[in-house]
Amino acid sequence: MAVERNNPYAGFNFLVNLNDGAEPASAAAGFSEVSGLGMSVDVIEYRNGNENINAPRKLPGLTHTPEIRLSRGVIGVTTLFTWLHNVANGAQDYRNVTIELQSEDHSQVVMTWSLTQAIPVSYTTPALSAIKSALAIEELVLACQTISVS
């Protein structure tokens, strides 16, 4: 349930639950960034030929959800790649994923995004470079049927 307040919440305290049997706050789901949460609705324009107004009506059409990107530092756990590999080989491993934004002091969940029937569609390994001193970040991209906010 969304918790309203005057000042915006900080976006750095969040939990991702991939519904893989692991604890949501475990290191295996310790993502550093989640992006792409959203939804859009197509507009269908329709006009009867005998209407007096020379402008079409705007009707709601299909709903689309963008791909959701989950990023985390490489920690030696292969569960994300294994999930994608299983789906690529025909497994019907749909999951209901939740992303919970927490208050700054972790005392309450202030907003939840629920992804229904999510499947992995892409996995990107980190760029490895002996010249740079950067963290190795892997990325998993999810596609889902619907997104709801509560």
Image (tube, helix red, strand yellow):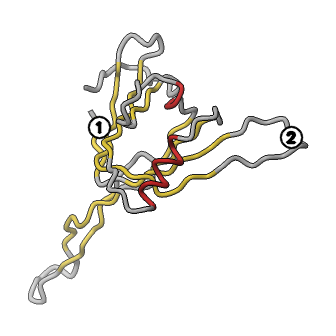
Looking at the rendered image, the quarter that the N terminus falls into is top left
- Where is residue 141? Give x, y as percent: 50, 51
- Where is residue 41? Give x, y as percent: 29, 60
The residue at the point 34 percent across, 37 percent down is 113
Helix, strand or loop under label 1: strand
Helix, strand or loop under label 2: loop
* In the displayed structure image, the side of residue 127 where residue 98 appears, left or right: left
Residue farthest toward the bottom in the current orientation of the protein: 49
Looking at the rendered image, the quarter that the C terminus falls into is top left
* In the displayed structure image, the side of residue 50 where residue 63 appears, left or right: right
Q: Is residue 50 above or below residue 18?
A: below
C-alpha separation, residue under disc 1 versus residue under disc 2: 39 Å
Q: Which mark, by number, is residue 131? A: none
Q: Amino acid at mark 1?
A: Val
The residue at the point 59 percent across, 36 percent down is 72
The residue at the point 21 percent across, 82 percent down is 54
Closer to us: 74 or 101: 74
Mark 1 nearby-residue class (10 Å; few <14, some 14–19, many ≥20): some
Q: Amino acid at mark 2?
A: Lys
Closer to us: 2 or 113: 113
* In the displayed structure image, the side of residue 150 where residue 73 appears, left or right: right
- Where is residue 149? Give x, y as percent: 29, 37
Mark 2 nearby-residue class (10 Å; few <14, some 14–19, many ≥20): few
Q: Are marks 1 and 2 in contact (CB under 8 Å)?
A: no
User: Label 1 belongs to which residue?
Assistant: 149
Nearest to N terminus: mark 1 or mark 2: 2
Choose mark 1 or mark 2, whichever is in front.
2
* In the displayed structure image, the side of residue 48 where residue 82 appears, left or right: right
Q: Is residue 55 above or below residue 122?
A: below
User: Label 2 belongs to which residue?
Assistant: 132
Q: Is residue 106 above or below residue 86?
A: above
